Amino acid sequence: MKTIWKFELTPNRIQSITVPLGGQILTVHAKGDNAPTLWVLVDPDMPPKERILGVYTTNTEVPDDPGRYVGSFFIYEGSLEFHLFEMESLPEGGTETELD
């Protein structure tokens, strides 16, 4: 039996979440002006797997290969725009980082 999990993300940050193996990212949205929320369809009986996510603001630098595009979301009545990508691995440096 599968279920849908949700994760609160941090804007403008490379971060990881732990999701059961085979979890399918469904969508990302901001709820009001709060942090973005990611919904993932999972089988909770599967072993955990770390997933790396990059959240980038419009008009900021993005790596040459930012990963697989997941979606975009807006906060503060659309004045801030963000774009979510799933990455194969952490970028150079190897840790979660705040983006400039």
Image (cartoon, helix red, strand yellow):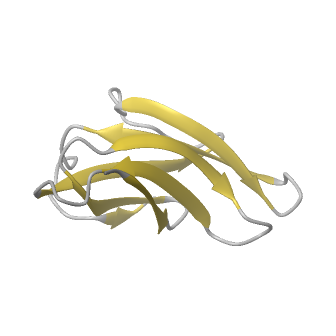
Q: Is residue 100 visible?
A: no
Q: Point out residue 30 in the picture as x, y percentages from the top left corner.
A: 69, 59
Front position in the image: 10 or 17: 17
Front position in the image: 3 or 53: 3
**Image point (25%, 60%), residue name:** 44
Front position in the image: 20 or 13: 20
Q: Quadrant of residue 36?
A: bottom right
Q: Point out residue 68 in the picture as x, y percentages from the top left corner.
A: 38, 29
Examine the rendered structure and indicate whether residue 18 appears above or below residue 22: below
Please tell me how many numbered marks the rendered image carries. 0
| Left or right of residue 16, residue 54 in this image | right
Q: Point out residue 81 in the picture as x, y percentages from the top left corner.
A: 71, 48
Front position in the image: 98 or 10: 10
**Residue ranking furthest to the front:** 1
| Left or right of residue 24, residue 27 in this image | right
Q: Point out residue 11 in the picture as x, y percentages from the top left corner.
A: 55, 62
**Image point (78%, 69%), residue name:** 33
**Residue ranking furthest to the right:** 77
Q: Is residue 90 visible?
A: yes
**Residue ranking furthest to the left:** 47
**Image point (43%, 50%), residue name:** 40
**Image point (70%, 72%), residue name:** 34
Examine the rendered structure and indicate whether residue 34 appears above or below residue 36: below
Q: Quadrant of residue 19?
A: bottom left
| Left or right of residue 59, residue 33 in this image | right
